[in-house]
Image (spheres, rainbow, N blue to C red):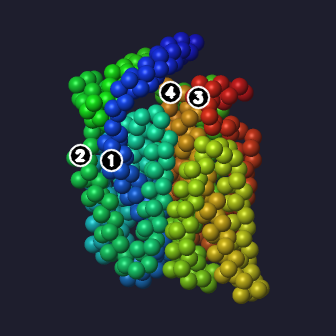
Amino acid sequence: MEEQEIREPLVRQTKNHSDQEEDGLQRENKESLWMVYFSTFVSVWGSFEFGTCAGYSSPTQAAITKELNLSLAEYSVFGSILTIGAMIGAITSGAIADFIGRKGAMRTSIAFCVAGWLSIYFAKGALALDIGRLATGYGMGVFSYVVPVFIAEIAPKNLRGGLTTLNQLMIVCGVSASFLIGTVLPWRNLALTSLIPCFIMLVGLFFIPESPRWLAKIGRQKEFEGALQMLRGKDADISYEAAEIQDYIETLQQLPQARILDLFQRRYLRSVTIGVGLMVCQQFGGINGIVFYLSQIFVSAGFPADVGTTIYAILQIVVTALGAALIDKAGRRALLLVSASGLVLGCLLAGTSFYLKVHELSLKSVPALAVTGILVYIGSFSVGMGAVPWVVMSEIFPINVKGVAGSLATLVNWFGSWVASYTFNYLMSWSSYGTFIIYAVINGLAILFVAILVPETKGRTLEEIQAAVNKS
């Protein structure tokens, strides 16, 4: 009841200020958003760096294991320890971003990534490799939280959705860049190229403002107004938007501080089940195992790894951009169902190719089947299951538990990523086709999960989404 009493004035205040803001902008019409676009451009280099961290292990596996004489177990640790660092980064990112600001959190992430890549570059054995990989993972985990939060907090409401999707697109571009550059550069030099997005971002952060909402939250009123004015243009009327942000901050401070145990109350249980469940579906379907060791999969199937990874890199960018364009038209639920169905098909095709190879049946068709299966899998993941769970998660949690619930869902996501990346090589050694059958079954269960539990959130206000989620 208390929560409802607080929310209703917020809705009325927000609506009034929104109407006033639109009227004000129509009168002034002097809003200049170049700083919003520039700030977004700077921050999404963190997403690109995220992608280079994730994509590094696939094109470098053969070279690193040969030069440093690593066993399968040692390389599996190197590949998967990234996600351990990311889990730690994700857990601490909220506190860091709240304590030293969004820009401060991004600088912290850059420092860890630079230290990590230098450790990998100078590595003479498994220990230095693992320390470097753990450090880049930590930076990656912080970026995974702070970049989309920063973009959402600086963008006007009519641009927020489009600009936020650039986060996922740049992650994909970073992964693809690692794959493509990794086909022509030695592994140590590839590590050095990953310092470039860090340098671009570090320089760019000196020229962009801090998040106005964070400044308002910590009571730095003058800096809050200055940052908002810089983002909207020196001649823009920011009074209405500034009042709206202040109302939101004041209302947020009245809500009770959520704890992790509060998430298991009946009124939050369904939204938490949906948010966490989608992360389980996303990661346990095998995506990070397949992406981290993509080159090795192509080699095992008898297909040229360089050609396969190049096709993959281009396909992933195109399909992710397509998914971003469709998310507000086709809807979240439809994309998830199509995506999960494609994942099942891709796993079955890849599994069939390895079955034929193991039993020496129709060997000429094995490479084509494997490549087709992997590309169907990657394309299907990119169009829906990659980005949509994060969008749905941001929409279904009530405002007073969003931080705690979001941290839980993010932690589950990174834990699933670690499980998939660590076990993949062992599963492939046990049974190559059996591995893909397991992933097909999990993705089949994801279809049922989405069909039964996940509501459509397209075109709804947050209040309408909450009402739909809490019906049952």
Q: Residue at x 74, y 74 (%)?
A: 352
Q: Nearer the viewer, mark 4 or mark 2?
A: 2
Which SS class for mark 2? helix
Q: Which residue is mark 2?
A: 207
Q: Which residue is mark 1?
A: 38
Q: Which residue is mark 4?
A: 399
Circles 2, 1 touching at the beta carbon (< 8 Å): yes
Q: Residue at x 24, y 30 (%)?
A: 226
Residue type pointed to by label 1: Phe
**Gap between marks 2 and 3 measured at Cα:** 34 Å
User: Sequence-wise, which precedes: disc 3 or disc 1?
Assistant: 1
Circles 2, 3 touching at the beta carbon (< 8 Å): no
Q: Nearer the viewer, mark 1 or mark 4?
A: 1
User: Sequence-wise, which precedes: disc 2 or disc 3?
Assistant: 2
Q: Quadrant of residue 364?
A: bottom right
Q: Residues within 10 Å of mark 4 (few under 14, many from 20)?
A: some
- Give me the disc on residue 407: none
Q: Please state if 448 lies on the left or on the right of 302 as rendered.
A: right
User: Sequence-wise, which precedes: disc 1 or disc 4?
Assistant: 1
